[in-house]
Amino acid sequence: MFWLAQLPPLQVVYPADQQKTQADRIFLIGTADPRQTVTINGQLIQRSPAGHFAPSFPLQLGPNQFELRSGDQRLTLTVIRQAAQPALAPGTLLADLQPQQTIAVSPGQPVCFSAIAVPQAQIQVQIGSLQLPLQGQAIAPLPSNSAVLIGQNQPDRPAPIQRYEGCTTALAAGFQGQPQFQIQAGDRRLTQAAPGSVTVWPAQPYRVATVTAPEAIARTGPSTDHSRLTPLPQGTQAQVLGQTGEWLQLAYGGWMRTSEARLTTSAALPRSQVRSASFQSRDRWLEFRVPLDRPAPLRLEQQGDRLTLQLYETTAQTDTIRLSTDPWLRSFRWEQARPGEVTYHLQLASQQQWGYRLRYDGNILVLSIRKPPTISQSRLQQPLRGLRIYLDPGHGSAEDLGARGPDGTPEKDVTLTVSNLLRDRLQQLGAAVLMSRKGDEDIWPQERAAQIQALEPDIALSLHYNALPDAGDAEGTQGIGAFWYQDQSQDLARSLHDSLVSRLQRPSYGIFWNNLALTRPTVAPSVLLELGFMINPREFEWIVDLDAQSQLVEAIAQGLVDWFHSQP
């Protein structure tokens, strides 16, 4: 066979020597001469016909040594397993004292303190003139979000230490300084200050954040670990209840970075009024325009043919709304179900939505709702004629290789090859294809997402090949995966996944809702496809096979034709 003329030496492409991980096991991805056996720590391992391997091995805490042998070749590497749960150093009574950052709150808002310590300790916090006892909590630590990708997202067993917690709303206004933690465990006593300090703002003036960024990323808590909410358009004004480090706590329920807003004070609360509103039809967009006396925080949700817009810190004085005769809007209603929240309910003409934009034009909120594309009725020659499809070959350049196959082949090269083939096929079918990159270019995911927002394609596809977290089973995991974030993208993701699995007779890895840069664009259905596992020795051989690539491209193209023509 041809590949025997270029036999690879023994090599390991993952993990690197001295790599650190918190996983309890790790896979070794590599290749060697298929005519030679390969052992790892004396154990004979299985390989693919081309000589690739990816076995997993358990890890002990601390350094783990691996020796690989193939013929007269020998490799050694060390993997260091670190503790996944917080731990107390020997002889230590307290650790992870919270708050870690400077925090400030409005009067009446809770201030919370916590620390980890040995079980059955007595802990209290001295803050200002207040002494607050903390109570031990039996909490099962949660693994990272990536654990669901390998089916291991169950809570961990409680650690042999405890987290002690307590909150209060009884602090007086002013700077309270650093909380002092006092612990008694047996005959040992210790007092230790938390790194952060606490300030309680006066009752007045109120604090107001005005969004200065093109959009502020609102989150459920004060870190990027917390989930995203609907971004706040530039100009939004919202009451601030507190601050933790660089994060502002907004009264409507979101958190945002201080760097994305201007913080001012006001004798009055930032409250908005809304009266009339109107719809306007503009080419491919239906605009819903809501004049306010000041830009209010908001949230938007999609579900099938329904779109719901909520305005917070807003009171309705509405008697008249001008509707549209555009058939894309099937029905409309609004309500103020609770004080300070106005909700608009829009029902569209089909279950498939095609995108939206949100912005403030001065004090006018503009929600632009995308209408369906015009789809060719001919299924014989050019069934995608008139459609604009954005293709993103994942990764790119030496700085962004993506996953690597057992022989070192980078994901970026395979995605570009397949994307170019798919571009050519889609053009034959009549589509106009927009490419995120045409060569070995270094483009950040956020830049690609910005391209989608600017170009406004009818759909966007990002093509990738997969890998796994360290604790995954590289030898036993194969298949097609599809990822979506906006509700308008869910049906496209499911349809393409099912089509590829059926047409190619490939395993299914699954369909995932996932907060990824390339699935977040709102102007079009945007889906990220994982077309197989680079790290699986046998699936990798399918991935780089030229005939298999041609079959894959045809399956994607026909899946898109079927999906577009299934839309009412």
Image: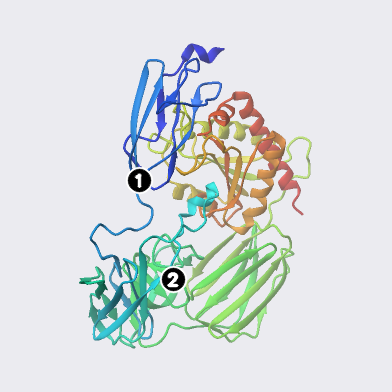
x, y percent for residue 388: 62, 45
Q: Quadrant of residue 368?
A: bottom right
Residue 208 left/right relative to 496: left
Can residue 384 be seen here? The reply is no
> For the residue marked with disc 2, what is the amino acid?
Gly
Up-down relation of residue 297 to residue 43 (above or below): below
| Residue under the point 57% across and 12% down | 1
Residue found at the far front of this picture: 187
Can residue 125 be seen here? The reply is yes
| Residue under the point 34% across and 48% down | 82
The disc, 2 or 1, on the residue closer to the chain's N-terminal end is 1
On residue 489, which mark appears? none
Q: Quadrant of residue 100?
A: bottom left
**Which one is in front, 473 or 277?**
473
x, y percent for residue 507: 65, 38
**Which one is in front, 439 or 46?**
46
Residue 397 left/right relative to 480: left
Which residue is labeled 1 in the image?
Answer: 61
In terms of secondary structure, where does tag 1 sit?
A: loop
x, y percent for residue 159: 39, 60
Of tags 2 and 1, which is closer to the observer?
1
> For the residue marked with disc 1, what is the amino acid?
Leu
Q: Quadrant of residue 562?
A: top right
On residue 235, which mark appears? 2
**Pointer 2 local density, CA inside 10 Å: few below 14, some 14–19, many at least 20:** many
x, y percent for residue 53: 49, 28
